[in-house]
Image (cartoon, helix red, strand yellow):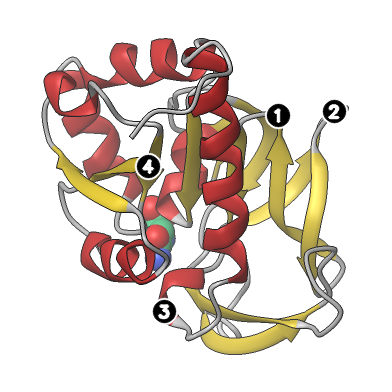
Amino acid sequence: MKIGILAVQGDFEAHAAMLQQLGAQTAEVRTPADLDGCDGLILPGGESTTQLKFLLEEGLADKIVKFAERGGAIFGTCAGAILLAKDVQHPRQDSLNLMDMTVVRNAYGRQIASDVVRGPTVLKKEPLEMVFIRGPVIERAGPGVKVLAEYAGKPALVQRENILAATFHPELTDDTTVHEHFLRLAGSHRKRTNGGKSST
Ligand code: GLN
């Protein structure tokens, strides 16, 4: 299993460490060609305006949208979730438009602007530890978008088919639950593209 990680800026190394701990191969993605052969892609936290500019300039935005259309698994955390959202506010910003949701940037307010909290999740019995760093609030999740975890009554981890988005940073805790879930998604893509055959 090979997972690409957008490595422009932000915390891509923490994602790589967690995925490697789970037995996945990782590849830093900076050009469209870097995405070839990947079963999944992580869009890490950082600054979404800077990241979007890079994706557009390098021709990566189109490539990522095509990757998703072919069923490739994508996981956006924090700034990455902003890049995936159909509707971005505060301020308005373009996006890859891969998840039908409205996000409001930097909207948790001062108190939990940067904090470690816990919230309920459908992925396990115990509440999920969530590290927020100037994260966006998901104000609307469209039909077909499943809420997998929430905090303070707002969705914090959402999924639509092969696309996963978190407003927090699961890579900054010791809990591998969310990354394990993402690897299962990427694994099902791998089976489809191999025509059901497993490969090494
Ligand atoms: N505040 C950043 C943005 O709006 C996201 C912060 C993060 O990724 N930790 O792009």
Q: Which mark is residue 161?
A: 1
The quadrant where residue 125 appears: bottom right
Quick one: SS at disc 1?
loop
Q: Which residue is mark 4?
A: 1
Q: Earlier in the sequence, mark 4 or mark 1?
A: 4
Q: Earlier in the sequence, mark 4 or mark 3?
A: 4
Residue type, label 2? Gly
The local crowd at label 2, few if under 14, some if 14 to 19, many if 20 or more residues have their Cα within 10 Å, is few
Residue type, label 3? Leu
Disc 3 versus disc 2: distance between alpha carbons?
28 Å
On screen, residue 48 above or below 145: below
Instruction: Looking at the picture, tell me which residue is in the foreground, 51 or 144.
Output: 144
Q: Are marks 1 and 2 in contact (CB under 8 Å)?
A: yes
Residue lying at 37% horizontally and 42% vertically, measured from the top left: 1
Of circles 4 and 3, the one toward us is: 4
The local crowd at label 3, few if under 14, some if 14 to 19, many if 20 or more residues have their Cα within 10 Å, is some
Residue 26: x %, y % from top left: 24, 50
Disc 1 versus disc 2: distance between alpha carbons?
8 Å
- Left or right of 63 on screen, residue 103: right
Q: Earlier in the sequence, mark 2 or mark 4?
A: 4
Disc 3 versus disc 1: distance between alpha carbons?
25 Å
Q: Which mark is residue 65?
A: none
The local crowd at label 4, few if under 14, some if 14 to 19, many if 20 or more residues have their Cα within 10 Å, is some
Q: Earlier in the sequence, mark 1 or mark 2?
A: 2
Residue lying at 37% horizontally and 45% vertically, measured from the top left: 43
Of circles 2 and 4, the one toward us is: 4
Residue 184: x %, y % from top left: 60, 46
Q: Quadrant of the C terminus?
A: top left
Residue 197: x %, y % from top left: 52, 20
On screen, residue 122 above or below 85: below
Q: Which mark is residue 172?
A: 3
